[in-house]
Image (spheres, rainbow, N blue to C red):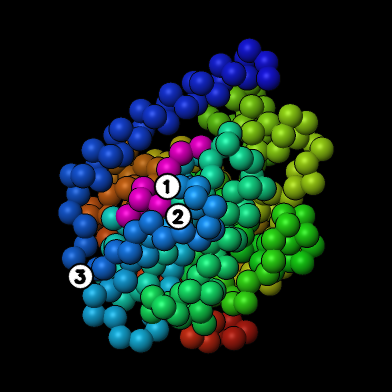
């Protein structure tokens, strides 16, 4: 690795460490939603790796199988774990859902292939053990924020494509993803100005090396990682896009909306303008679920999942834009 590459990685890790301290203070100051039982630190792979653990959030009054939300946390593919979105997950569980949130290995300790394999391993755990925790495999939804939105979209596409399953080395799940909610998600890895902001080409190149290897183009999954590369021709489930104009990555949601529209997909949006100022920035509804705007947003997400809970909505209906 070059001196520049090491410097970029050091800078990124220092930034994420600083964000981590702020996140811990934020989470400690919040009051989690009441009425939810939390099962913490369940191994989804028996290899002793602390990044192969998951949490489950179950309503205390659960009686029988519940619609199930899988939450994939963000963090630039380099930061976070199963606890990062715990208050958001408890907010969803309090509305009558079983919720699963997993840790996955982070860059640079693995690559994008390893992260996608971890997500699938957790979903296979859900398939084998979800019934023990009130999870109904006939009603499974995925939500992800930022980089977690990218992984959620990618996992959904891989589940629908035997060719992508071979590329990523995963086995298909025995259940369908009913609907997908992408919160302030990254979708296109080949848009450096959208992925890396003002840092430019140097940071973008180093991110690609961490995701794909020293020679990115040599990775079998290179060119098969962005939404537009993986979703074309697939029978996608309904998609909800959540974003805001104050989010520096809002361009990704606009790109994804345009792509879904042009390909006839079922899509719904919850986009906030600048009425909330900078407050309604990146992943505000995940980080601050107690805010009024967050409650409105997350309630719409719950309603979206409820709509597609049983029959997948109205068969033959037009795309929702």
Q: Position of residue 6 (x, y in %)?
A: 59, 18
Magenta extent = 77-86
Instruction: Quarter of the image for the N terminus: give it.
Output: top right
Nearer to me, 133 or 145: 133
Q: Which mark is residue 53?
A: 2
How many neighbours does mark 3 have within 10 angstroms: few (below 14), some (14-19), or many (20 or more)? Answer: some
| Above or below: residue 177 compared with residue 14 | below
- Residue displayed at 57% across by 68% down: 124
| Gap between marks 1 and 3 measured at Cα | 23 Å
Q: Which residue is mark 1?
A: 81
Q: Is residue 84 magenta?
A: yes
Answer left or right for 215 relative to 194. right
Q: Quadrant of residue 67?
A: bottom left
Q: In the image, residue 296 lies at what x, y percent?
A: 29, 62
> Residue 121, percent across and down?
58, 61
Q: Is residue 73 left or right of residue 85?
A: right
Q: Residue at x 45, y 80 (%)?
A: 131
Circles 1, 3 touching at the beta carbon (< 8 Å): no
The answer to whether residue 108 shows anywhere in this view is: yes
**Residue in the image at 38% along x and 60% along y:** 55
Q: How would you rate the neighbour count of disc 2 (Cα within 10 Å): few for under 14, some for 14-19, many for 20 or more?
A: many
- Residue 13 drawn in magenta: no
Q: Mainly helix, strand or loop, the magenta region?
A: loop
Q: Residue at x 29, y 34 (%)?
A: 22
Q: Which residue is mark 3?
A: 35
* Disc nearer the start of the sequence (1/2): 2
User: Is 273 displayed left or right of 78 in the figure?
Assistant: left
Q: CA distance from mark 1 to mark 2?
A: 9 Å
């Amino acid at each position: 690795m070059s001196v520049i590459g090491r410097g970029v990685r050091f800078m990124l890790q220092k930034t994420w460490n600083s964000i981590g301290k702020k996140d811990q203070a934020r989470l400690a100051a919040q009051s989690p939603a009441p009425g939810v039982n939390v099962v913490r630190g369940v191994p989804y792979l028996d290899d002793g790796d602390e990044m192969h653990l998951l949490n489950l959030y179950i309503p205390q009054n659960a009686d029988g199988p519940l619609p199930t939300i899988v939450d994939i946390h963000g963090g630039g593919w380099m930061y976070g774990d199963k606890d990062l979105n715990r208050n958001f997950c408890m907010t969803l569980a309090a509305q009558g859902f079983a919720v699963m949130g997993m840790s996955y290995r982070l860059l640079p300790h693995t690559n994008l292939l390893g992260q996608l394999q971890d997500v699938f391993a957790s979903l296979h755990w859900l398939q084998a053990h979800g019934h023990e925790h009130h999870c109904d495999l006939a009603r499974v939804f995925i939500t992800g924020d930022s980089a977690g939105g990218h992984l959620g979209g990618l996992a959904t596409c891989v589940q629908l494509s035997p060719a992508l399953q071979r590329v990523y080395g995963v086995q298909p799940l025995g259940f369908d993803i009913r609907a997908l909610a992408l919160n302030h998600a990254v979708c296109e890895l080949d848009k450096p100005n959208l992925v890396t902001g003002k840092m430019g080409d140097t940071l973008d190149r180093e991110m690609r090396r961490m995701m794909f290897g020293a020679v990115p183009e040599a990775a079998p999954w290179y060119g098969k990682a962005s939404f537009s590369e993986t979703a074309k021709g697939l029978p996608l489930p309904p998609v909800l896009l959540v974003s805001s104009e104050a989010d520096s990555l809002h361009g990704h949601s606009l790109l994804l909306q345009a792509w879904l529209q042009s390909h006839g997909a079922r899509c719904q949006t919850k986009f906030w303008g600048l009425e909330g100022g900078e407050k309604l920035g990146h992943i505000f509804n995940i980080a601050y679920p107690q805010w009024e705007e967050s409650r409105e947003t997350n309630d719409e997400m719950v309603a979206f999942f409820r709509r597609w809970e049983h029959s997948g909505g109205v068969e033959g209906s037009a795309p929702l834009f």
